[in-house]
Amino acid sequence: MEISRKKRSHVDYSHYRKSNFEVLRILSIYAIIIHHLIAHSGFTWSQFKVTPQKIWLMSILPIGKVGVGTFILITGYFTFRHPPKVKTLLRIVTTTGFYSILIYILANLTIPGTRVTPQTFFQSVFPIISNLYWFATAYFFMYILMPYLNQLAKHMAVKQYVILLAILIFVICGPAYLMYYGIPVYGYTDIAVMILLWFTGAFIRKFESFFQLKSWFLFLILVLLICGNFLFHVWGFYIGVKHPKIYTYTLNIGMYNYSFFSYVLAVVVFLLFKNMKIRPNFFINFAASGVFAVYLIHDNPYVSNLIFRHFIHFTEVKDLGLMIQQTFTIPAVILIVCLLIEYSRLILFGQIQNLYIGLWAKILKWLDQLFVKLLAKMFHYNHHNFLKK
């Protein structure tokens, strides 16, 4: 009887999402909102005026880049050796399109001065192609490339993998130290940095035994990195009064999109949460399922301008204590409101979206089979064997 009770009390959690990573996913989007609050509120960054408020804002600003990094590291860790699902790709496209078109319609109906132009119409109807959301566009194309990235990652030995990561880090992160802030280095860097982060997440998953680092050690590294970043910005600001170029390099190294500092910090945070043991929690996992929509809602150009420039007057806060408080409380409110909007969308339109995705999944499967048969005929090969190859 005692054995049967134990068996009944045992729950297999292997098929559930791991809540430690889902907590990290939520914190990632929270960090991104903090970044957007500072970056889009309209602060004027005079390089010759150093204040405690400015040091605080510029020191906390890189947190958004770290959030992007941890989000993609999670993707690489869990999609390694698993073929990407067509339905997931379709869900990304349909969710992005839904919010882009809906917000565009509401903006033109409610915001004075908003005009319909061919450019804004195209951007809103085709947000992925038009790069309306840089993250969604880069993520979409990375997802398409994922089967090939998986094949490459699976067949590399440790030495080959480390050399590949070193090359990617040098090519992608290196130019950040040579550039003036705000000027892009290459046109492909958004997708390239995601590929670097995906390969890093896959590397951690593939060689997991190499990453058995103690949590206290990772936490110590994290504290040293954060303190080092703060002191580095303080030094850069004060010395930048006389040497503006040093000030510029400080910005690039500390908060540029592809900074090596942001990359390392994201990896350390990811490893720290990887060590955490949190039993699968429905509420955490449910909240984490809506974070992509949170990004789509709050970072839409119309919504972002409305929130950060008109509703929230963050630039008018002069008291440092109040500024620090609002740096964390305002993004928390935005996160909760956007999650509620997303869950309302799922209740009202979730079933319709699922049917639409299912239909397109069948169409794409049929086209794929047709393409395989066509290739088999072209190469005079049995299409079943061709598919296996």
Image (cartoon, rainbow, N blue to C red):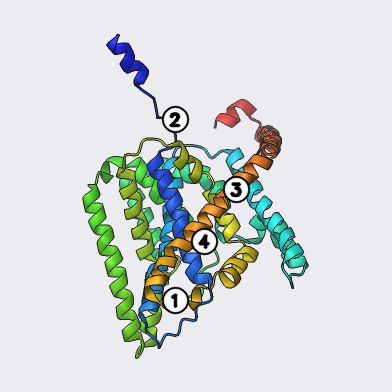
For label 1, the crowd category at 10 Å Cα-Cα, with few meaning under 14, some 14 to 19 and many 20 or more, is some
Q: Position of residue 187 (x, y in %)?
A: 55, 66
Name the mark nearer the viewer: 3 or 1. 3
Residue at the image point whose x is 45% and y is 66% from the top: 257
The first of marks 4 and 1 along the sequence is: 1
**Residue topped by disc 4:** 190
Amino acid of disc 3: Glu
Amino acid of disc 1: Met
The numbered disc on residue 82 is none
The first of marks 3 and 4 along the sequence is: 4
The first of marks 3 and 1 along the sequence is: 1
Marks 3 and 4 sit apart, C-alpha to C-alpha, by 26 Å
Q: Quadrant of residue 296?
A: bottom right
The first of marks 4 and 2 along the sequence is: 2
Nearest the viewer among 10 and 224 is: 10
**Contact check, label 1 and label 2, Cβ < 8 Å:** no
Quick one: SS at disc 2?
loop
The first of marks 3 and 2 along the sequence is: 2
Residue at the image point whose x is 47% and y is 40% from the top: 283
